[in-house]
């Protein structure tokens, strides 16, 4: 059918262009943020692109939802501006008639948003956290790139080492600078080797010297050694930490309905419901009034999107803090948004106005004279 195919083609072009633009912007922002984390030592520099890709995958729900909303608003607004809507309306097509081709175009996108929010979002968060934990669990010697100065995880040591062993356990030309209060220690050695003693990791230095400087008293002491052991990790046992709710699968959130887990579940389900409701709002808000200008409707559409998404985040905090329950909030926010979108769409479809409901004083006066 010409009516359906023309609308779907316009929506597809607008949606594809919007996705490319938004994805490029988000990737640039996340890349800058990830590079900053790698500079601070939170992310392995060699895994920057992997972390960035996983983070972008986690934000695809927002990108697809906003792209679909913008595509609906921009496509229908252009049809109003080019008088195409007048042609369709004069041929017997009302505004509600646009809902069917819109749903046929958007249902794969809505399904993808739901799958991304319920399954891919926790998986990507878990993968990113595993990469960070794996890098944090590496000892200080393993963090250092050959021929480069680099700080340790705690920021109290500076290392320089030339690694020449396949397992990164032995290195030559070792330089270690540490600061503990007013005491500064600079240690150099010809060779260093990592050794384990009773669950603790030591760096066994050979043929070197150590300089101790007390910044408070100004005392300096230099000693030479043939063999010196430097403690690197006090314990290899990893402390067990509870997984955050955003890393748990949706099934695990249902199995453990704590306030934090229910808040996270409301956020994931809310993303899918928000995408559906925003699509209907986009159909209702898209119009062009020559007296007002196109920017007015675009600003109104942007306000609806920002307000709705902020309420989804606020609802997550309310449920996590116990201020609201999951069923009550989901029904009030998303049910209310659906009702508002349907009411708005009905008003636009039947071309209703408050003047038709409440007669103006001039009309009342005219009726009285008659």
Image (spheres, helix red, strand yellow):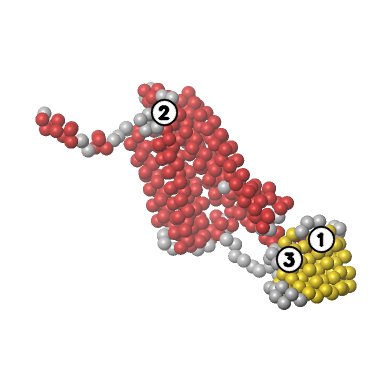
Density class for disc 3 (Cα within 10 Å; few <14, some 14-19, many ≥20) is some
Q: Are marks 3 and 1 in contact (CB under 8 Å)?
A: no
User: Compared with residue 211, is residue 82 higher up or lower down, i.e. above or below?
Assistant: above
**Label 3 to label 1: alpha-carbon separation:** 13 Å
User: Compared with residue 92, is residue 209 higher up or lower down, i.e. above or below?
Assistant: below
Name the side, left or right, on which 361 lies relative to 102: left
**Label 2 to label 3: alpha-carbon separation:** 65 Å
User: Compared with residue 99, is residue 258 higher up or lower down, i.e. above or below?
Assistant: below
Nearer-the-camera pick, 238 or 249: 238
Q: Which residue is mark 1?
A: 161
Q: Which residue is mark 3?
A: 157
Q: Residue at x 86, y 73 (%)?
A: 224
User: Compared with residue 236, is residue 3 higher up or lower down, i.e. above or below?
Assistant: above
Tell me the tag on residue 80: 2
| Residue 6 rendering spot, x and y as whole percentages | 49, 26
Q: Residue at x 70, y 59 (%)?
A: 135
Density class for disc 2 (Cα within 10 Å; few <14, some 14-19, many ≥20) is some
Q: Quadrant where the C terminus lies?
A: top left
Nearer-the-camera pick, 40 or 275: 40
Tell me the tag on residue 335: none
* Mark 2 secondary-structure assignment: helix
| Residue 257 rendering spot, x and y as whole percentages | 50, 62
Is residue 200 in sight in this rendering? no
* Mark 1 secondary-structure assignment: strand
| Residue 208 rendering spot, x and y as whole percentages | 86, 69
Q: Nearer the viewer, mark 2 or mark 3?
A: 3
Name the side, left or right, on which 157 lies relative to 226: left
Q: Residue at x 74, y 75 (%)?
A: 218
């Amino acid at each position: 059918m010409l009516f359906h195919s023309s609308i779907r083609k316009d929506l597809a072009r607008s949606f594809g262009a919007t996705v490319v633009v938004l994805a490029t912007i988000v990737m640039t922002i996340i890349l800058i943020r990830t590079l900053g984390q790698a500079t601070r030592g939170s992310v392995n520099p060699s895994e920057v692109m992997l972390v960035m890709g996983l983070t972008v995958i986690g934000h695809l729900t927002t990108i697809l939802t906003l792209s679909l909303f913008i595509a609906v608003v921009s496509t229908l607004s252009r049809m109003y501006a080019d008088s195409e809507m007048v042609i369709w309306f004069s041929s017997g097509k009302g505004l509600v008639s646009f809902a069917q081709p819109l749903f046929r175009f958007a249902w794969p996108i809505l399904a993808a948003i739901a799958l991304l929010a319920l399954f891919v979002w926790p998986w990507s968060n878990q993968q990113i956290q595993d990469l960070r934990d794996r890098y944090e669990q590496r000892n200080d010697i393993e963090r250092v790139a050959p021929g480069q100065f680099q700080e340790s995880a705690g920021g109290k040591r500076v290392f320089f080492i030339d690694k020449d062993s396949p397992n990164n356990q032995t290195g030559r030309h070792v330089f270690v600078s540490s600061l503990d209060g007013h005491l500064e220690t600079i240690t150099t050695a010809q060779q260093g080797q990592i050794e384990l003693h009773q669950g603790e990791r030591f760096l066994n230095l050979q043929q070197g010297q150590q300089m101790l400087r007390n910044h408070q008293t100004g005392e300096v002491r230099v000693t030479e050694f043939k063999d010196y052991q430097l403690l690197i990790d006090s314990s290899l046992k990893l402390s067990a930490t509870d997984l955050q709710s955003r890393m748990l699968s949706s099934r695990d959130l249902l199995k453990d309905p704590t306030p934090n887990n229910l808040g996270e579940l409301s956020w994931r389900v809310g993303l899918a419901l928000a995408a559906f409701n925003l699509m209907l709002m986009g159909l209702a808000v898209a119009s062009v009034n020559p007296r007002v200008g196109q920017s007015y409707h675009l600003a109104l559409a942007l306000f609806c999107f920002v307000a709705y998404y902020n309420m989804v985040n606020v609802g997550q905090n309310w449920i996590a803090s116990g201020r609201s329950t999951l069923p009550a909030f989901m029904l009030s926010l998303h049910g209310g948004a659906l009702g508002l979108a349907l009411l708005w769409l009905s008003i636009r479809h039947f071309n209703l106005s408050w003047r038709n409901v409440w007669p103006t004083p001039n009309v009342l006066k005219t009726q009285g004279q008659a």
